[in-house]
Amino acid sequence: MEKIGIFGGTFNPIHSGHLMIAEFLREELKLDKVLFIPTGNPPHKDLNVSAIDRYKMVKRAIKTNDKFEVTDIETKRENLSYTVDTIRELKLIYRNAKLYFLIGLDTLFQLRTWKKIDELSKEIDFAVALRPKYIDISKINEEISYLQDNFDTNVEIIHTFQLEISSTDLRKRIRDGKSVKYLMPDNVIEYIEENNLYKND
Ligand code: ATP
């Protein structure tokens, strides 16, 4: 059976931390591919960078990895949708595949607040990337038990390397005129420069 990792995020912008855990999880879970899904722009939120720009940056970033793909399933939508609707749509496309939702540790602790997490949990299992030196494993186990008890969520922990990079920090560095080289692929940096993104955030 084909195994596909679903990696959703704002990717505003995509960075080496995202790419590294996607590759790690792909290897550890023996995934045939990882499908990146940039989220749409919330209509009420005036993000400076369009959904199309974020999608295009992901497309560039994954160019050299033939196991990575990106879809515009969410960025092309006029209205924001629930993750569960996206997953249901994908399951119609990949009928015979086992899907995993790939997340970082910060997202694990946000899952309980996601809209329709109970429905989503019925559709897909989660794989969370855990930093090797993360000390408070009991807090993680507690959260996983909470999700399991309340929403029937299945979460698998995968120990990975991780880079302490966030899109928030990168946006700030760009705004401050600082270097982001090696923190994201060169072709993404070029896109940001060509389109003057994040400069005046
Ligand atoms: P922001 O700083 O704007 O909140 P972010 O860097 O956390 O953004 P997202 O697009 O929100 O990026 O994240 C998408 C997914 O990638 C989430 O599941 C998040 O937990 C994970 N992630 C983000 N940064 C890292 C990182 N450095 N290492 C591992 N996972 C990460």
Image (spheres, rainbow, N blue to C red):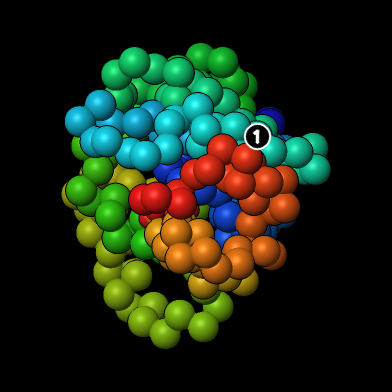
Q: Quadrant of ligand 1?
A: bottom left
Q: Which residue is mark 1?
A: 59
Q: Is residue 40 visible?
A: yes
In the image, 121: left or right of 170?
A: left
In the image, 119: left or right of 192?
A: left
Check disc 1: other Cα within 10 Å, few if <14, some if 14-19, many if 20+.
some
**14, 160: nearer the viewer:** 14
Q: Amino acid at mark 1?
A: Lys
Give residue 24's position: percent from left, percent from top: 66, 58
**54, 27: nearer the viewer:** 54
Look at the numbered disc 1 and say if its residue's Cβ is closer than 8 Å to ligand 1. no
Q: Does dot 1 land on a helix, a strand or a loop?
A: helix
Residue 192: name its quadrant.
top right
* Up-down relation of residue 61 to residue 164 (above or below): above
Please tell me which residue is depicted at 43% across the width and 25% down the height of the picture.
74
Please tell me which residue is depicted at 57% across the width and 26% down the height of the picture.
71
* Up-down relation of residue 52 to residue 6 (above or below): above
Please tell me which residue is depicted at 36% across the width and 50% down the height of the picture.
201
In the image, 45: left or right of 103?
A: left
Give residue 78's position: percent from left, percent from top: 34, 15
* Up-down relation of residue 85 to residue 60 (above or below): above
Q: Is residue 188 visible?
A: no
Give residue 91's position: percent from left, percent from top: 50, 21
Quadrant of the drawing holding the N terminus: top right
Please tell me which residue is depicted at 31% across the width and 24% down the height of the picture.
81
Task: Count the marks.
Answer: 1
Give residue 96's position: percent from left, percent from top: 61, 22
